[in-house]
Amino acid sequence: MRSSCVLLAALLALAAYYVYIPLPGAVSDPWKLMLLDATFRCAQQVSNLIQSLGLSHHLIALNFIIVSFGKKSAKSSPKVQVTDTDFDGVEVRVFEGSPKPDEQLRRSVVYIHGGGWALASARISYYDQLCTAMAEELNAVIVSIEYRLVPQVYFPEQIYDVVRATRYFLRPEVLDKYKVDPGRVAVSGDSAGGNLAAALGQQFTSVDSLKNKLKLQALIYPVLQALDFNTPSYQQNMNTPILPRHIMVKYWVDYFKGNYDFVQAMIVNNHTSLDVEKATALRARLNWTSLLPPSIRKNYKPVVQPTGDARITQEIPQLLDVASSPLVADQEVLQRLPKTYILTCEYDVLRDDGIMYAKRLESAGVNVTWDHFEDGFHGCMIFTSWPTNFSVGIRTKNSYIKWLDQNL
């Protein structure tokens, strides 16, 4: 009996050691966040083991775990009709809210889920619940795009998928089918989905037939650049859940089908050193010493290497492709973008990507709403139901939907 108690105590101590990580006191529901982070880390480690045994790619294994725990069938309710279909060969889930009695046409949001271009799905419960809530509260049609993921495809195929599906949806006959007002369509996405939404918005500005087709863009803690992994938020939150810096850099490498051997060099910005001419020109557009306010810059210093590893951009030239990093687009492109909402969280490596994009858009004359949450962390907006119900998740979701309701 005594030995069993000792063993149990040891196991509990090990579990506590695994779960506990130091967190800022101001972050929302810290102990709940520790448990969520520990669960995700465990799933990552299991998927890495599966790959090391030669059974499957680690991202396929990890996504299988994520989807298995949260996949939902297309289930309609009295207030929202849900349908799985495809738009020009791209799978989508459509959520149709009930129109108001005095409305003949409804507004609409094209939504692009996050997950590092490799994980999650429009069909898992987190995004199903978010889109259902949007459809119901906005009396809108929400098109949630099920774009193809890494390692099935790599950059820029994910962009092609969301552009193709959105162009199809914007056809007059399709909008008419769903009773959508062509002047009240927005594009939105979170994290990597925010990256794809921003890229889509920029591409639409260069196609005459698509100009002014999007009334709004709403970007939720978007990832917008791969040139500087030492912005103040990357330095401040390098080990903060749910997205520590080294994991974000690995997502970029996976997205470009690159080599993990470059990860550590990229973390210290060796891929955009001063001897990489094109990188120097692009980094001038994300000079955070001028784009970020003093309250965000604090005492952090830029990390700029005089010389780096030329092999990185030679083998992964996509790192310097503006299509992958919407933050560094030309000013002429930015000034043609629609009214924009950008939500950022204090405890998120991607915080400064969103803030800098808001500043660049404002400088280009775009009407921008920047919505910042001091106790937020990356991914929080989809965590609104038990057991992953965070107070900041509920507040970010409500704030986001309220903005859409007031502006779309």
Image (cartoon, rainbow, N blue to C red):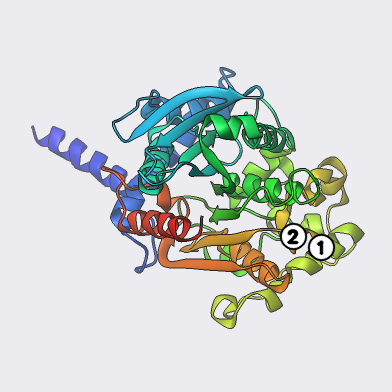
- Residue drawn 56% across and 75% down? 296
Residue 279 in percent (x, y) is at 84, 59
Residue nearest the viewer, comparing 107 with 129: 107
Residue 286, above or below 299? above
**Total count of labels:** 2
Q: Residue furthest top?
A: 55
CB-based contact (under 8 Å), mark 1 and mark 2: yes
Residue 332: which numbered mark, if any?
A: 1
Asked which quadrant contains residue 43, the reply is: top left
Residue 203 in percent (x, y) is at 75, 47
Tell me the kind of residue under disc 2. Arg
Residue 114 visible within the image: no
Residue 177 visible within the image: yes
In the picture, measured across the screen, residue 138 lies left or right of residue 365, that is left
Categorize mark 1 by other alpha carbons within 10 Å: few (<14), some (14-19), many (20+). Answer: few
Q: Secondary structure at mark 1?
A: helix
Residue 34 in percent (x, y) is at 35, 51
Residue 404: which numbered mark, if any?
A: none
What residue does disc 2 label?
A: 336
In the picture, measured across the screen, residue 278 lies left or right of residue 130, that is right
Q: Secondary structure at mark 2?
A: loop
Residue nearest the viewer, comparing 350 with 408: 408
In the picture, measured across the screen, residue 49 lies left or right of residue 320, that is left
**Where, quadrant-wise, is the N terminus in this rendering?**
top left
